[in-house]
Image: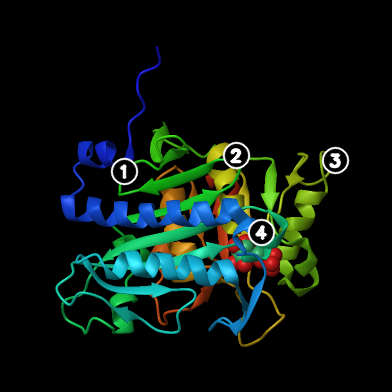
Amino acid sequence: MQNPKKNLASLLRDHGVSSELQLLIESIVDATKEIARAVNQGALAGVLGSTQDENIQGETQKKLDVIANQIIKDALLSNEQVRALASEEEDGVIAGNNHGNYVVAFDPLDGSSNIDVNGQIGTIFTIYPARKDVASNSELQFQQQGTQQVCAGYVLYGASTLLVITTGGPTRCFTLDSISQQFLLTNSTLEIPQDTQEFSVNMANQRFWQPPFKRYVEELLEGEAGTRNKRFNMRWNASMVGDMHRVLVRGGIFMYPSDTRDAKQPAKLRLLYEANPIAMLVEHAGGKAFNEQQRILEIEPQALHQRVAVIMGSANEVDVCLKHLRH
Ligand code: P6P
């Protein structure tokens, strides 16, 4: 008889997470179960397709983007521990309970372009201590380095519905049991292999990359006879959560570098609710997470929806990439 698997609540309790933070995490996770039901129903629930609206990112909102955003917003605004929230789908900060001890940022549905083709999508969330020295709805609530995160996680709506989370200890993976509707611990310590033969980048942007990055990728493509004396494979899910889950489970290097497509916006991925939470999960699984200059978690945020280049995954391969960028 297998040992009964731990559920999220018992694991958080065993690892000394305060009851307030535990209840907050559980309210976010419960919201993702509702999103999972909507995702799994898909066309049958009439949730596929796009709305007529654009978000602050200039992206057309999918129906499920809006639905997922509302589900999480409702859950957070009914939790007294939440002083403020920020979302990829919201222009500004939304105030919660003025006496709340935490602020929460989230990407309600990352990888939205995959929704209508049944591809991998996920919810990314991050929790910081609330700042008591600024107003609840001030953007300064979220201008905190990624090192200040008290919890980071994602829920991947894939073949299984998985929760990957850290509260400062190991990065762990839970699988949603469809019978009990509980997330049960299925990997107590994710560990990213230090080396890899798998890279993840959107090759269609190659002509827009800076020369040093272009050279690094060219060497990956040269194979055994090339500079690296090594054959590499490539994967690109067009969903950071999907690509990064693969990296967390079997290693790899995931990259979205700055490029020349838009001088005003050289990077694509968002620092607050994509790069920082995933960077925390990666580092707590023994990997590295940098932009082209520095550790992502040490970036001093300047704006709510600021974008950042991302190079993260197997530590030794990240080092090789960064070495190219520094020459
Ligand atoms: P592209 C999804 O929109 C996202 O923000 C990430 O999840 C994903 O890695 C990236 O953008 C995909 O970008 O340019 O390949 O569509």
Residue 251 % position (x, y) = 58, 41
Q: Vertical placement of 63 versus 238: above or below? A: below
Label annotation for residue 195: 2
Disc 4 or 3, which lies upstream in sequence? 4
Q: Is mark 4 within 8 Å of ligand 1?
A: no
Tag 3 near tag 2, CB within 8 Å: no
Foreground mark, 3 or 2? Answer: 2
Quadrant holding ligand 1?
A: bottom right
- Give the residue type at disc 4: Ala
Tag 4 near tag 3, CB within 8 Å: no
Circle 3: element type: loop
Q: How is the image coloured?
A: rainbow
Label annotation for residue 169: 1
- Give the residue type at disc 1: Gly
Q: Vertical placement of 39 versus 54: above or below? A: above
Residue pointed to by mark 4: 43
Residue pointed to by mark 3: 225
Disc 2 or 4, which lies upstream in sequence? 4
Gap in angstroms between the C-alphas marked 3 and 1: 41 Å
Q: Which residue is drawn at 42% across and 82% down?
A: 303
Foreground mark, 4 or 3? Answer: 4
Residue 71 % position (x, y) = 42, 65
Q: Quadrant of the N terminus?
A: top left
- Give the residue type at disc 2: Asp
Please say whether residue 258 is visible from this viewpoint.
yes
Foreground mark, 1 or 2? Answer: 1
- Give the residue type at disc 3: Ala
Q: Vertical placement of 200 versus 2: above or below? A: below
Gap in angstroms between the C-alphas marked 2 and 4: 40 Å
Disc 3 or 1, which lies upstream in sequence? 1
